Amino acid sequence: MSDDLDALRGETADALAAAADLRAWDAVRVGTIGKSGRLTGLLKGLGAVPAEQRKERGAALNRLKAELEAAIEARRVALEAAALEARLASERMDVSLPPRPHPPGGAGEGGIHPISRTIEELTAIFGAMGFRVAEGPDIESDWLNFSALNIPDHHPARQDHDTFYLPAGADGRRPVLRTHTSPVQARTMLGQEPPIRVIVPGRTWRADHDATHSPMFHQVEGLVIDRGITLGHLKGCLIDFLRAFFGIGDLPVRFRASYFPFTEPSMEVDIGWNRKTGELGKGGDWLEILGSGMVHPRVLANCGIDAREWQGFAFGMGIERITMLKHGMPDLRPFYESDLRWLRHYAADPLAPPSLTEGV
Ligand code: 2NL
């Protein structure tokens, strides 16, 4: 083996080891096996070697070429791996880091208002039963708010002291601020074929203001239209809902005959509680919590549904009311006062998902 080949082997190994990045590495590669590289030069010079040494010299050069190519490639792999390691280390993110403790409603961190939280819970519970959420405008025609729902002209709900009327439109009729969310169910029936399963949470308006009434409040109504729907479906659905919402698996529930213009028969629904302590679930007293019934055939007809083929049930309740009962809130007014002390006390943690069985 010639000295010049040994020198090239050693110097290339040193240069490769010294190459700290791919640019330096490439300079070594070009300088060794590139077009004008040292090894290439030696190979080109083979022709000038005396014939008797040429064979041995050629074999030695080819061995060195294979050796250097392997060493150059190995260095490239090592440099690329090191570069990747360095990049991964510099961009590392600790995804296991837990979120900072989050005071509900506190110190500008934001919390979920109890009304919103109850709507999230209603959506979770009824969503699991196959209901979708429907929404509609606050300003409605009196036909959708009243007539479609079989509320006749002389009904007390139509009197000015209950209903906010707006100035008459081009048709000469006065729109209203919806007094319940039922017009959204009417829109749903008019807009799609049964089967229908919707809940409608939302703002409602009545010209009524005292310690227990606000001119703006929230309701949730529900509507199911399908073939062969009976009172049994209504009872099962509402019993399951009430037990899930209040988180009391054996909550007593009582159905009591009543009257609504839009349902026939109609029932008010009571839950068991203790009148003295306010505790829900036991105590032998009854508390009215919601209204319900089988959708009146005239309402179905008004909304374009054939009552001989389709039946349904509906229900409605006040969101403030069920929220106050669930959390033992004594007063309705703070819901709308934006008092941070009240909000910090009652707001829900935005990171805690609404639970089907426990609520907040
Ligand atoms: C209550 C009573 C109720 C309904 C609302 C309804 C809606 C349509 C058709 C039939 Cl589109 N019914 N809604 C039915 C029964 C009772 O609410 O006391 N709410 C606070």
Image (spheres, rainbow, N blue to C red):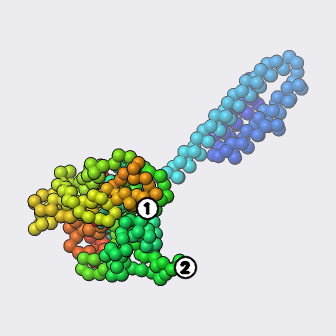
Crowding around mark 1 (Cα neighbors within 10 Å: few <14, some 14 to 19, many 20+) is: some
Q: Quadrant of residue 15?
A: top right
Going from N to C along the chain, the mark reached first, 2 or 1, is 2
Disc 1 marks which amino acid? Asn
Disc 2 marks which amino acid? Ala
Name the mark nearer the viewer: 2 or 1: 1
Q: Which residue is mark 2?
A: 170
Quadrant where the N terminus lies?
A: top right
Left or right: residue 328 versus residue 146 is left
Image position, residue 65 (x, y; %) = 74, 28
Camera-nearest residue between 20 and 203 = 203
Image position, residue 67 (x, y; %) = 69, 28
**Dot 2 lies on which element?**
loop
**Dot 1 lies on which element?**
helix
Q: Which residue is mark 1?
A: 302
Residue 163 seen in this snapshot: yes
Camera-nearest residue between 148 and 317 = 148
Crowding around mark 2 (Cα neighbors within 10 Å: few <14, some 14 to 19, many 20+) is: few
Quadrant where the C terminus lies?
A: bottom left
Image position, residue 141 (x, y; %) = 46, 72
Q: Quadrant of ligand 1?
A: bottom left
Q: Is mark 1 within 8 Å of ligand 1?
A: no
Camera-nearest residue between 85 and 347 = 347
